[in-house]
């Protein structure tokens, strides 16, 4: 079984992974041997701090090993195909994770191997992030509440998150200017769950009575050519203390990180009491431990 998108992840498996992540964090055992002798190969076409380190620590905690390959120093940079690379990797490891520009390249890897392949972020989705995010929302007791994603609501993080939150029956609001709202494909998928899903360009309307406010960078990896336009278009969608005051008093603020302080989120919110971002970042490790266990030991 692969995890290429939340869209294609069976709902029962998704919930099992999140439940297991919550349980494993509570137990706090970081020295297990469930995956003794198992190897993860982790591929990176784009930069990463959290994803790379949380995959590595997750494998170490489970008694396995991780090997990281950066595209720049591999033969991919000299034209070896993704399909040929994937076939070679399969001989060395038990599971592959890959952070790639194109979802189609990830699908190409999955097509050519029989071992599990995990999406570590593409242009379309960031499913591992969304699993950890839902774990965090449950940890704060907000899973029955209203989640507002504000900013570039058409990006990879928004896509995965809206589907996970909708499957839990949260009231999901996607807020951004025109051109930064989710595709009809993702909206329809979220609506299919029966959850209340709203799209708006009005930040004040969006955050009213919110339990969770979520944002992400305005310029995702690969969008750099549009930087100036994006910073300008998204300016009214900053998560700052004025906006936060319009949510519920005990609302939490989430961000997948890295944050661009002063752009999508201010220092006072990032460093304030309502920020859940550090727990959220830690949960990447627990969620990926649970995910790898489920996929590899299937
Ligand atoms: N949130 C996240 O995926 O962070 P990295 O880009 O540092 O991996
Ligand atoms: N949307 C961001 C997420 C980074 C973790 C990006 O794709 O760059």
Image (spheres, rainbow, N blue to C red):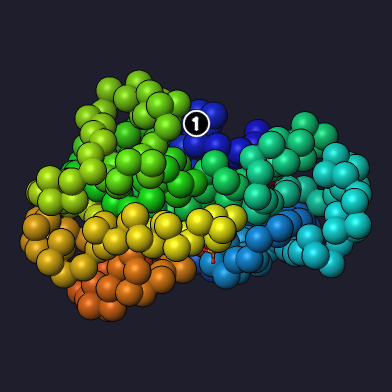
CB at disc 1 and ligand 2 closer than 8 Å: no
Q: Which residue was labeled with disc 1?
A: 7
Q: In this view of the protein, can residue 153 be seen by the observer?
A: yes
Percent coordinates x, y for residue 96 in the rendering: 73, 49
Left or right of 97, for residue 211: left
Counting labels gives 1
Q: Eyeballing the image, is 195 above or below 35?
A: above
In the picture, which quadrant includes the C terminus? top right
In the picture, which quadrant includes the N terminus? top right
Left or right of 276, for residue 283: right
Is disc 1 surrounded by few (<14), some (14 to 19) or many (20+) residues within 10 Å?
A: some
Percent coordinates x, y for residue 214 in the rendering: 30, 55
Left or right of 203, for residue 120: right
Image-quadrant location for residue 248:
bottom left
Q: Eyeballing the image, is 186 above or below 30?
A: above
Residue drawn where x is 23% and y is 34% of the image? 198
Kindly state the secondary structure of the residue where label 1 is placed: loop
User: Front-most of 229 and 92?
Assistant: 229
User: Front-most of 238 and 251?
Assistant: 238
Q: In this view of the protein, can residue 92 be seen by the observer?
A: no
Percent coordinates x, y for residue 54 in the rendering: 57, 65
Left or right of 30, for residue 155: left
Residue drawn where x is 24% and y is 72% of the image? 269
Percent coordinates x, y for residue 191 in the rendering: 32, 25
Image-quadrant location for residue 51:
bottom right
Q: Eyeballing the image, is 101 above or below 107?
A: below
Residue drawn where x is 30% and y is 47% of the image? 176
Residue drawn where x is 50% and y is 31% of the image? 7
Image-quadrant location for residue 15:
top left
């Amino acid at each position: 079984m692969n995890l290429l998108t939340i869209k294609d992840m069976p709902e029962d498996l998704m919930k099992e992974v999140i439940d297991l992540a919550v349980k494993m964090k509570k137990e706090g055992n970081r020295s297990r041997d469930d995956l003794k002798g198992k190897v993860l190969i982790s591929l990176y076409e784009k930069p990463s701090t959290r994803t790379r380190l949380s995959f590595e620590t997750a494998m170490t905690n489970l008694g396995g090993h991780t090997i990281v390959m950066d595209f720049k120093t591999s033969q991919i940079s000299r034209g070896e195909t993704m399909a040929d690379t994937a076939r070679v990797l399969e001989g060395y490891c038990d599971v592959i994770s890959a952070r790639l520009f194109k979802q189609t390249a990830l699908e190409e890897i999955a097509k050519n191997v029989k071992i599990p392949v995990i999406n570590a972020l593409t242009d379309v989705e960031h499913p591992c992030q969304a699993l950890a995010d839902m774990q965090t929302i449950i940890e704060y007791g907000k899973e029955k509440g209203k989640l507002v994603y504000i900013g570039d609501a058409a990006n990879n993080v928004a896509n995965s998150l809206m589907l996970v939150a909708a499957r839990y029956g949260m009231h999901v609001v996607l807020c951004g200017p025109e051109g930064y709202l989710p595709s009809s494909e993702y909206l329809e998928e979220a609506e299919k769950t029966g959850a209340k899903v709203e799209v708006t360009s009005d930040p004040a309307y969006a955050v009213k009575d919110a339990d969770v406010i979520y944002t992400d960078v305005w310029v995702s990896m690969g969008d750099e050519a549009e930087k100036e336009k994006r910073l300008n278009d998204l300016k009214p969608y900053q998560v700052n203390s004025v906006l936060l005051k319009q949510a519920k008093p005990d609302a939490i603020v989430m961000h997948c990180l890295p944050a661009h302080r002063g752009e999508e989120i201010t220092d006072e919110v990032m460093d304030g009491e309502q920020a859940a971002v550090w727990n959220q970042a830690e949960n990447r490790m627990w969620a990926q431990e649970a995910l790898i266990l489920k996929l590899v030991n299937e």
